[in-house]
Image (cartoon, grey):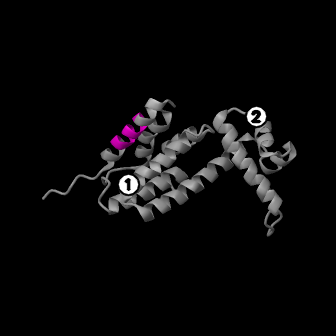
Amino acid sequence: MTQPTGRAPRSDARENRARILAAARAVLAGDPSAPLQSVARAAGVGQGTMYRHFPGREALLVAVHQEEMNALTDTAVVLLATYEPLEALRLWFEHLTAYGRSGHGAAVAVEAAARAGGGQDRPPAVALLDLLLEAGKEARQVRPDAEAEDVLLLGSCLWRAEDRPAWSARRLRMLTVIIDGLRAAPPIA
């Protein structure tokens, strides 16, 4: 949505955008290929309003992804302030797994971020994981050779697992194996 320079969006426009994003998360989680008309209907807005905010499916998916990344960023900061780094990493991976399983292209976005490699413009998921890993390395809880891209690709198995009750327990075991593999070796006495 474009706004005149220097003006904040009107409150009704902000509310419409927020409703569209919330509806998109819900609708696309149920059916990732749902048409934008379904999202507009679920949000209680007309198609014109929908297209004023998001001119196409890709723009909507990017906005949903950005909103989720912002939430994951906030979560990472809170977890690091509340828990030891390795536990914060484990809890953050649970949030990331829920996002990856959300069905609106999240898994593809996160895996693409992991494959993007290094560089100055690191994808948000990689930068967040770097933050958590570095905190763990500084606390000597995470092995020094752990790289965010590698850990993210390894962790992608968590949101690819089937969505059945037995797999919920399996995902927790798999996450434990990942976290245990990241654990720094105890110092030699």
- Mark 1 vs mark 2, foreground winner is 1
Q: Residues within 10 Å of mark 1 (few under 14, many from 20)?
A: some
Residue drawn 57% across the image and 42% down it: 109
Question: Residue 44: x percent and y percent?
Answer: 81, 45
Residue drawn 47% across the image and 31% down it: 165
Q: Residues within 10 Å of mark 2 (few under 14, many from 20)?
A: few
Q: Quadrant of the C terminus?
A: bottom left
Q: Is residue 84 left or right of residue 63?
A: left
- The label number, if any, that marks residue 35 in the structure image: 2
Question: Residue 149: x percent and y percent?
Answer: 44, 46
Q: Main secondary structure of the magenta part?
A: helix
- The label number, if any, that marks residue 3 in the structure image: none
Give the magenta range. Answer: 170-177
Q: CA distance from mark 1 to mark 2?
A: 39 Å
Q: Is residue 136 left or right of residue 37?
A: left
Q: Is residue 36 left or right of residue 85?
A: right
Per the image, the residue denoted by label 1 is: 87
Instruction: Tell me the element at label 1.
Output: helix
Q: Quadrant of the N terminus?
A: bottom right
